[in-house]
Structure formats: structure tokens, C-alpha cells
């Protein structure tokens, strides 16, 4: 049985993107990037909304030559080695290997996918994660908080979900970022 994880990088005030959709303020340094690589390495399948898929699609064709930083080559390999399920009602084709499109998010289907998985599944993007959270499917919430306040934008959590959490891990980074890992209380 797999674990469904929701991982996000946010500003201190809880946003994954600013009002214009930008997230350059969240760019990881080498220490953080290496940590995220190790964190996501157990992922066998990504569940992604269209916008998050299009953002991460960069890694499908990114440069993996020796001139590219080792942490970036490593992440590209992690991305390329995973299955990807993109939930989109508008996407007609994918631009990456090991990728399928689902027209809508079906909690029962995702529950079965997690139950039959040999590795972790990672839900990417706050809109899709909101559906998984509302359905009670998320086993672990992982947050990388970077030292920025951006004031508004796209929140990492939906406003209509109430969920008691237990802190199960944390880490501080030299650049001021903090990693937090939570499990919904009452689970595992």
C-alpha cells in the first residue's frame, strides 16, 4: 500500500504563487533542492492538475549534461522515472512519457490507486490537493516554507478544510527555509 503525500513550497504567509502566478521567490538553493529530491525520490506516481503538470513539464526535456547542476539532473531523473496522472478537462495530449490524462478527479479511483501502489504517490498543486484533502485521501502534508511574505496569491490549502494535524518531522535550512511534515491526527 502506498502513501498519498501532498508537498508544497510556500511563502511564510501560505502562498504557492503570487497574484500573477509567479513563484520565482521560491527557487530552492542547492541544499533545499537536494533535500526535496530525496523527499520526492520515493514517489512512483504524481497526481497533477494541468497547471502544475505544465510547470513541471520543464523537467521532461531539461538539460542533463554535465554543465547542469547535479541536483537539477537528479530531479530530472526523478521526474522522468515517475508515472504521471494529469487531471484536466481541457488537455488533449501529454508531452511527457509515462503520462495519462483523467478528465475528473475520482476519490474512489484514487483510493484504489493508493491501496494497490508499491510506492508513494504525490499530489501536486493546491487545486487538486484540495480535492484530495476534502475526500480525506491525503496521508501526509509536507510544506517547505521559504522566508518570503508575498501578501496574496494562490494558497497552498483550501479555505474550507478543517483538519487536525500532528507534526511528525521538521528541518531548518541555512537560507532560512523550514520543512514541516504533518500527518492528519487519528491516522497511522
Image: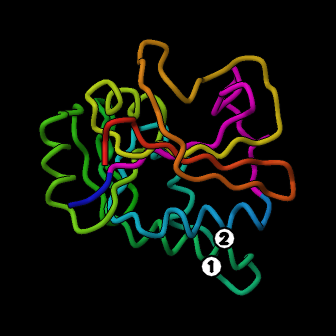
Residue name at image x 20 percent, y 61 percent: 1
Q: Does the magenta stretch include residue 27?
A: yes
Query: In the picture provided, is 170 more to the left or to the right than 174?
Result: left
Query: In the picture provided, is 51 more to the left or to the right than 63?
Result: left
Q: Mark 2 points at which residue?
A: 72
- Residue 17, placed above or below residue 123: above
Of the pair 162 and 42, the residue shown nearer to us: 162
- Residue 34, placed above or below residue 177: below
Q: Tell me the CA gap for discs 1 and 2.
A: 8 Å
Report x, y in % for residue 70: 70, 79
Q: Does the magenta stretch include residue 76?
A: no
User: Sequence order check: which comes first, mark 1 or mark 2?
Assistant: 1
Q: Give the range drawn in magenta.
A: 4-28
Q: Counting other residues with Cα less than 10 Å from the Cα at mark 1, is it few (<14), some (14-19), or many (20 or more)?
A: some
Of the pair 34 and 178, the residue shown nearer to us: 178
Of the pair 25 and 112, the residue shown nearer to us: 112
Determine which of the numbered discs, if any, sits on residue 64 in the image.
1
Report x, y in % for residue 92: 29, 41
Amino acid at each position: 500500500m502506498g502513501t498519498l503525500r501532498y508537498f508544497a513550497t510556500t511563502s511564510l504567509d501560505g502562498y504557492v504563487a503570487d497574484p500573477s502566478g509567479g513563484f520565482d521567490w521560491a527557487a530552492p538553493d542547492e541544499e533545499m533542492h537536494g533535500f526535496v529530491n530525496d523527499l520526492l525520490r520515493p514517489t512512483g506516481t504524481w497526481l497533477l492538475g494541468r497547471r502544475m503538470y505544465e510547470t513541471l513539464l520543464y523537467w521532461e526535456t531539461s538539460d542533463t549534461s554535465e554543465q547542469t547542476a547535479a541536483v537539477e539532473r537528479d530531479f530530472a531523473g526523478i521526474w522522468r522515472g515517475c508515472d504521471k496522472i494529469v487531471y484536466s478537462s481541457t488537455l488533449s495530449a501529454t508531452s511527457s512519457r509515462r503520462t495519462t490524462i483523467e478528465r475528473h478527479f475520482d476519490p474512489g479511483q484514487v483510493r484504489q490507486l493508493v491501496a494497490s501502489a508499491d510506492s508513494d504517490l504525490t499530489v501536486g498543486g493546491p487545486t487538486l490537493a484540495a480535492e484530495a484533502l476534502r475526500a480525506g485521501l491525503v496521508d501526509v502534508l509536507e510544506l517547505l516554507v521559504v522566508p518570503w511574505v508575498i501578501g496574496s496569491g494562490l494558497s497552498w490549502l483550501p479555505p474550507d478544510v478543517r483538519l487536525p494535524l500532528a507534526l511528525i518531522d521538521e528541518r531548518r535550512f541555512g537560507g532560512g527555509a523550514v520543512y514541516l511534515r504533518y500527518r492528519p491526527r487519528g491516522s497511522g
